[in-house]
């Protein structure tokens, strides 16, 4: 049975055709309301939240199935893209009164896409100590070149082989992937400069020892 809303009525045809109002039926609304009231409070809550849960689930599925950008290429080992170059001899140090200290200049260029750190520089000769200016560790940004002064002091000339044709320095590098040491042969110019400087240093050292011995015998 169809219920008429207040203010609405069906008009009968008289002497001529008259417009007829279309009446809405509220039977479906009453059936839904009756069914809804029969549901328990917990079930009504679940039915209310179900559309929201389905919407969230849809967003999650869409996000998980969305194509992911390709992973960036792994950074190379630290020494693979570090270029070490010998720049030249810097002369005997005026800060060492014994005259046994000399300076050598090197450059380190970072050719990687990640920051490279120069952690340490050492030499293989036990009779030679080495320090740097600036002091290490030293960070080198991608594409950057830094200049480092190697300050070498002859402490025991008997342990510095003057006939070594390929002297090298050991450089420890670090990046986001690893830390490792690399032996760097700086070339003939470094070999010649190092041997000449250490010859002068050891000669001065012997002269200082002789002068000290002579002075002690006089006293």
Image (cartoon, rainbow, N blue to C red):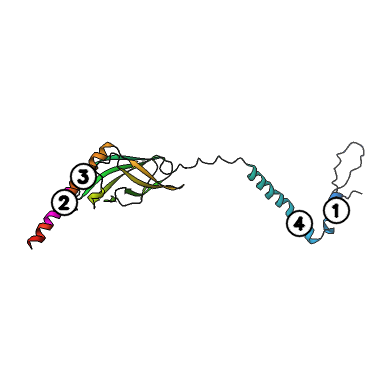
Nearer-N-terminus badge (2/4): 4
Between marks 3 and 1 in the image, the one whose residue lies nearer the viewer = 3
Residue at the spot of label 2: 206
Between marks 4 and 1 in the image, the one whose residue lies nearer the viewer = 4
Nearer-N-terminus badge (4/3): 4
Marks 2 and 3, how far apart in space?
A: 14 Å
Q: Position of residue 18 (x, y in %)?
A: 87, 38
Marks 2 and 4, how far apart in space?
A: 96 Å
| Label 2 secondary element | helix
Q: Position of residue 157 (x, y in %)?
A: 22, 49
Between marks 2 and 1 in the image, the one whose residue lies nearer the viewer = 2
Marks 4 and 1, how far apart in space?
A: 22 Å
From the viewer's side, name the closer residue of 98 and 111: 98
Category of crowding for the residue at label 2, using alpha-carbon neighbours closer than 10 angstroms: few (below 14), some (14–19), many (at least 20):
few
Residue at the spot of label 1: 30
User: Are circles 2 and 4 on residues that touch, CB within 8 Å?
Assistant: no
Between marks 4 and 3 in the image, the one whose residue lies nearer the viewer = 3
Instruction: State the quadrant of the C terminus.
Output: bottom left
Residue at the spot of label 4: 46
Q: Magenta residues?
A: 203-212
Q: Which mark is residue 197?
A: 3
Q: Is residue 135 highlighted in magenta? A: no
Nearer-N-terminus badge (4/1): 1
Query: Left or right: 176 with respect to 37?
Result: left
Nearer-N-terminus badge (2/3): 3
Query: Left or right: 1 with respect to 32?
Result: right
Residue depicted at 85% across the width and 53% down the height: 30
| Label 3 secondary element | helix
Q: In the image as oriented, which residue stretches furthest toward the left? A: 218
């Amino acid at each position: 049975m169809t219920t008429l809303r207040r203010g609405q009525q069906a008009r009968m045809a008289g002497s001529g055709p008259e417009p007829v109002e279309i009446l809405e039926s509220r039977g479906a609304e009453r059936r839904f309301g009756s069914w809804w009231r029969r549901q328990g409070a917990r079930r009504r809550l679940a039915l209310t939240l179900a559309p929201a849960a389905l919407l969230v689930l849809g967003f999650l599925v869409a996000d998980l199935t969305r194509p992911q950008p390709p992973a960036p290429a792994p950074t190379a080992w630290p020494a693979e893209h570090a270029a070490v170059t010998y720049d030249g001899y810097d002369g005997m140090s005026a800060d060492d009164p014994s005259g046994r200290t000399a300076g050598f200049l090197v450059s380190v260029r970072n050719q990687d896409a990640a920051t490279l750190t120069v952690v340490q520089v050492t030499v293989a000769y036990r009779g030679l100590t080495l320090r740097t200016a600036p002091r290490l560790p030293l960070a080198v940004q991608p594409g950057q070149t830094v200049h480092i002064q190697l300050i070498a002091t002859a402490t025991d000339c008997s342990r510095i082989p003057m006939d070594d044709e390929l002297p090298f320095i050991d450089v420890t590098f670090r990046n986001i992937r690893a830390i490792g040491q690399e032996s760097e042969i700086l070339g003939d110019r470094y070999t010649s400069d190092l041997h000449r400087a250490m010859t002068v240093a050891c000669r001065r050292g012997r002269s200082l020892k002789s002068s000290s011995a002579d002075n002690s015998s006089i006293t």
